[in-house]
Image (cartoon, rainbow, N blue to C red):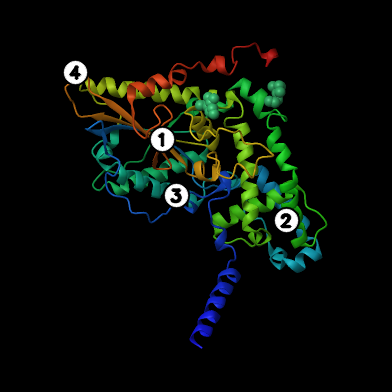
Amino acid sequence: MDSLLFLILCLLSLFIANYGMGSTDFRIPLYSTKTPYFWGKDIDEFIREDEEIWVDYDNKECQIIHLNLILRHGSRSPTLSWIKKMTVLGNILKSNPEVIERFPFLNSWENPFPETRAGHLSDLGEDEHFSLGRRFGRRFSLLFTGDLENILYGVTYKQRTQASCASFYEGLTDTLDGESRKNVKPAINDKLLRFFDTCSKYIKSVENNKTAAPEHTSFKYGAEMQRIAQKIADKLGLKTLNSEEAQTIHHLCAFELALFDKSDWCDMLEKEDLFIFEYLYDLKQYWKRGYGHSVNWGMSCPFNSNVFKQLNDVIYKARNGEDYNVADIQFAHAETIIPIFTAFGLFNDSVPLKADNYESQKERQFRTSKIVPMSASFGIGLYQCEASEDPEEVYVVRMFVNEKPVVIPACGQEICEYKQFMKYYDDLVNCNYAEICENNKPHDEL
Ligand SMILES: *[C@@H]1O[C@H](CO)[C@@H](O)[C@H](O)[C@H]1NC(C)=O
Ligand SMILES: *[C@@H]1O[C@H](CO)[C@@H](O)[C@H](O)[C@H]1NC(C)=O
């Protein structure tokens, strides 16, 4: 009898688990670059004060003297082209009685994303950056405390990066007790952070080139996407649905769920579909922003060379007992960060992402949901090691992706000696943007 009761309880809880699945179960890090940061990270994670301040290297204790940090803006509203697609699709589906019968919510559905706020930082995005300000403040408390005046801030001309910066600053100063909280006045660094806007070769050969990402195009119209689109069409009671319409439903689910905590559109999808959409978008980013073409990452030259310049400057000043910037914190875009990750050789799969290797790429490193969600970050920490018999101090670097240390390709370890680091990335240190982008050519050749 007891075991029967147990069995019934088990079945019941299974039933509840599946039945009650609803949309909450969809808050998982699978929405490529549209993934809110804390769907993949624990917002309640305990962070020890000064967690990343010291590190041991070669039996020496090293302490951070500079953090170079770039963050993507936080969760935002959809961009204008997606808002328009959402409205169009919503209207088509609303006018179909068959669809309404299956998804009655459509009767009263109106596009909740006003065009006037397209691409703007959302409340969720503000919360993300406030939390991140606090988290970085905790991890590097000793570096920042008493030195808030020696932090540089940079943004792009876009509202979402500026608002992200303001929220981050609030969180940072909130966690560093006793620090005065003046308004932050970041510099607009579009030359460093929006290098993709002015790179002729990139614009011509990749951005505006409809055939630059054939693997993405093949997958978009391939068997996996067709199967997903048909499955959604069947649910809706439609004959067919095309790949773009399926993507619009996916975006509606992602954005409504992120910004309003609930979306009936997610009921049209199944969890396994999310993996297919994720690969579709990974292919796009890989070929349009990542390893697919060398100009994609070559053009991040202005940002990269500036990082090395700053690190050298800090070392020079530290050696001479002069004041230096303890941090440079900049806010930009996925289009900024993916090329930078790539230039530094991170997440470089040995086999390229292709339309026909979805199955074999399931363990790929280039997974945008993990590496460039909303509020993603990339940090380089410069550490000074205690003086030994060597007349010259030893400096080492660490890299942080989304707050966690990663293996640095320059030495295959999480800590690299600065000299080795500089040598390995010599092409980034001494890059020539105009040459890489073929910006010197007369206009009629562009
Ligand atoms: C567009 O991309 C394809 C594939 O990379 C390339 O062969 C072609 O030359 C590019 N077109 C232009 C105008 O650069
Ligand atoms: C990525 O890895 C390949 C080898 O798998 C290598 O040839 C290439 O240089 C790497 N790309 C970058 C940008 O580091």
Mark 3 or mark 2, earlier in chain: 2
The residue pinned by badge 4 equals 391
Mark 1 or mark 4, earlier in chain: 4
Q: Mark 1 vs ligand 2: CB under 8 Å?
A: no
Amino acid, disc 4: Pro
CB atoms of marks 3 and 2 within 8 Å:
no
Q: Residue 320: x percent and y percent? A: 21, 19
Image quadrant assignment for residue 264: bottom right
Would you call the spot at circle 3 few (<14 residues within 10 Å), some (14-19), or many (20 or more)? many
- Using the rendered image of the protein, determine whether residue 252 is visible from the camera's viewpoint: no
Residue furthest to the left in view is: 389
Alpha carbon separation for disc pair 1 and 4: 29 Å
Alpha carbon separation for disc pair 3 and 2: 29 Å
Taking the spot 74% from the left edge, 43% from the top edge, the residue there is: 222
Secondary structure of the residue carrying tag 2 is helix
Q: Residue 330: x percent and y percent? A: 43, 34
Amino acid, disc 2: Gly
Label at residue 90: 2
Residue furthest to the bottom in view is: 1
Does 98 sit above or below residue 84? below
Alpha carbon separation for disc pair 3 and 4: 44 Å
The residue pinned by badge 1 equals 407
Alpha carbon separation for disc pair 2 and 4: 70 Å
CB atoms of marks 2 and 4 within 8 Å:
no
Label at residue 128: 3
